[in-house]
Amino acid sequence: MSAFFATCPKGLEYLLRDELVALGAADVREALAGAHFSGTLETAYRACLWSRLASRILMPLAEFDAATDDDLYRGVQSIDWSTHLASHATLAVDSVTSQSELTHSQFIAQRVKDAIVDQFRQRDGARPGVDTDEPDVRINLRLRRDRATVSLDLAGAPLHRRGWREVQGEAPLKENLAAAMLLRARWPEIYAEGGALLDPMCGSGTLLIEGAWMAADVAPGLHREYYGFLGWAQHDIALWRSVLDEARQRAEAGLSALRSCFFGSDADPRMVQTAKRNAQEAGVAGFLTLDKHDVTHVAPPPGFSRGLVIANPPYGERLGERNEMPRLYRAIGEALRERFAGWRAAVLAGDVELGQAIPLRAEKKYALYNGALETVLLVFELHAREDVPREAKPLSEGAQMLRNRLEKNLRHLRKRLERESIHCWRAYDQDLPEYAAAIDVYSNTGGPIHLHIQEYRAPADIPPETARQRLREIVRVAGEVLGVPRERIGLKTRERGKGGSKYGQFDQRGEFIEVAEGGLRFLVNLTDYLDTGLFIDHRLVRAKVRELAEGRRVLNLFAYTATASVYAAAGGARDTTSVDLSATYLDWASRNLSLNGFTGTKHRLMQADAVTFLEQDKEHYGLIYVDPPTFSNSKRAEDFDVQRDHVKLLLACAERLTADGVIVFSNNFRKFKLDHEALHERLMVEDWSMPSIPFDFTRRTDIHGCWLLRLHPQESPWNSSVNHVRKQGKR
């Protein structure tokens, strides 16, 4: 088994993870713009041939520190390149760098190439040549925070290049993004149920061709003539041929059974001809019907009562004036509403504002990246007009009481929320015992409101059906009172099983929304995790971190999504170091920092156990923020219990604290008791718990505790060990 990394556009990570699992990959885990996986060489071949979503399949060869070009050169030379290519072969090097001392990607690529060819020249006097188009071996170098990863690029060229595109339009949609749109809109299910695929703005035909290949079980890489492993010294020709032969047989069988249910149109006759030529090259022209007409004249094809309408309209950046776009998006929505009852629709909007111009309520929304441009995919279920306005059932007596309480809370909170520009807050927290849930509001400045509803454990004497009914009433009442449609409500429910009540399986949508807090921006996820990425009860704690951070070096332990690091950076911190054991949360943290303009070597992200980091780190910090979990039993670190281990943790923090430094310590264990006696010889403690509770959490003043800890005046990190010895002697 070998390790691999599949890259993809941002927003496709969860889809790619599921696809790799289906292809037989093991140990699959998503990462920012890609997914790690393990498998055999056959697994890698299948990923190259069958992945509809990946951009490249990388096989890591080595990882090492590379803060200088000499470090980089030596690290690359430590690899035995004769096992990967011959001296007469050709190579090419791609490189990317971020938050590292080496910042020039072209220089980095040149240095990598020099290290490889010098190794061959020193060994046998000959050296490989360079071919930037179709080399025998393509090497990928990724440098992130001075850590280099050298990989073989088994794809050789981006996998979205399927091999059928002869001509493209001005703003072509990449094939892997088209595949993601089709999968998010559940096209395979619609095809299996007899539905049609219709693209009323088909351009060069990308969505229709991808949809046809998907339905016919055609491997997306079947028409490609070049892969990066074909000239690799360890390439297994017989294995590759067997994988290829199987794909050809599947394609032949799939195309012979494919239905002619693909329809496209475009207002530009040149694009209609382009789509026809591309479909011919892809081998599916006979299954497509292509016409010239405007999107406003689109109608269901004869013989089909259901299907998927999918479109990638222009965004206004390249193909038209921005002020004309809302009118176009409205026209698309009106055509869908009037003529396509019973169908599903998916529209890739250039941004949220354009999506809101469509006069339909989206069932699902997904953030997808078209190159560097962040777009939003809107998925609609199109109902007949008479089916839409259903009269709501009257509220039960209990639900009406819940509504009254929630409205009262809003009246009480609204003025202060507006005055203090608070966009993320708690609207309800089990105010009525019968309705046991917390309702949190998340929004951006001027943006749509989202709700996060988290169910508390119902008493054992409450029948499960009663608890479920009350939860449904909570969702309905919260949506109605706060004006939030169901698709913008994230719901966390408990289920009963062995060991008692616990939260059930979470969704894996990969949907992030941007919210505002304290003049800063953060990404939250309301569906995929127990927590959203922003602990809103810590709003004032983060503000305290910003207040204390100016001019200080800041260490954030158990950093989670690094919201406190963002606050510290905004408060004028000299630099920040965020430590967490989870790569997923560190990627999220990196996005939060970048979203607020805090990038570069001044803002380090370290994947490590917090206690181990403190033991090994030799730096000193003016501000240390510690917000540990109540319990942790990660396989990569010793078990942690905040009550049992907080003294050891805080004393270790004291060793890393400057003489005038501050430790901000918080946690959410409601039964937690700070061990003052064990800490007082070394640290002065100020209980800041009550001032740290926001006004919207007054019903649960024990939701977290917070303490500010400072060294005694005689203490300093440079003489603490001496002082400790003296105190031991006095005893």
Image (cartoon, rainbow, N blue to C red):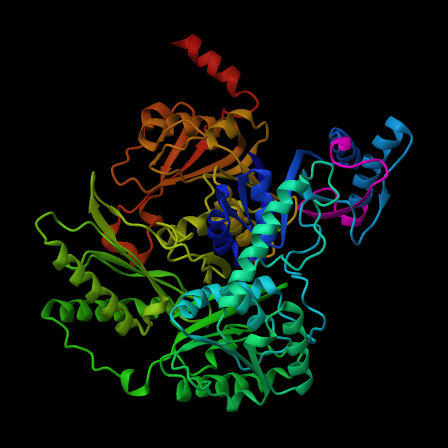
Tell me what residue is drawn at x 51 percent, y 35 percent.
661
**Is 327 in front, or is 307?**
307
Q: Quick one: quadrant of the C terminus? A: top left
**Is 93 in front, or is 566?**
93
In the displayed structure, 107 sits above or below 126; it is: below
Where residue 402 sits, quadrant-wise, is bottom left
Instruction: Report whether residue 433 is seen.
Output: no
Residue 541 point in image, percent of width and height: 41, 48
Where residue 640 sits, quadrant-wise, is top left
Tell me what residue is drawn at x 30 percent, y 66 percent.
413
In the displayed structure, 279 sits above or below 505; it is: below
Judge left or right: residue 504 versus residue 498. Answer: right
Tell me what residue is drawn at x 37 percent, y 83 percent.
341
Residue 74 point in image, percent of width and height: 77, 30
**Is 97 in front, or is 116?**
116
Tell me what residue is drawn at x 49 percent, y 67 percent.
257
State yes or no: residue 83 in magenta: yes
* Number of marks in the rendered image: 0
In the displayed structure, 707 sits above or below 388; it is: above
Report the span colored magenta.
81-107
Residue 701 point in image, percent of width and height: 26, 49
State the residue lying farthest toward the left. Answer: 461
Residue 448 point in image, percent of width and height: 42, 71
Q: Quick one: quadrant of the N terminus? A: top right
State yes or no: residue 363 in magenta: no
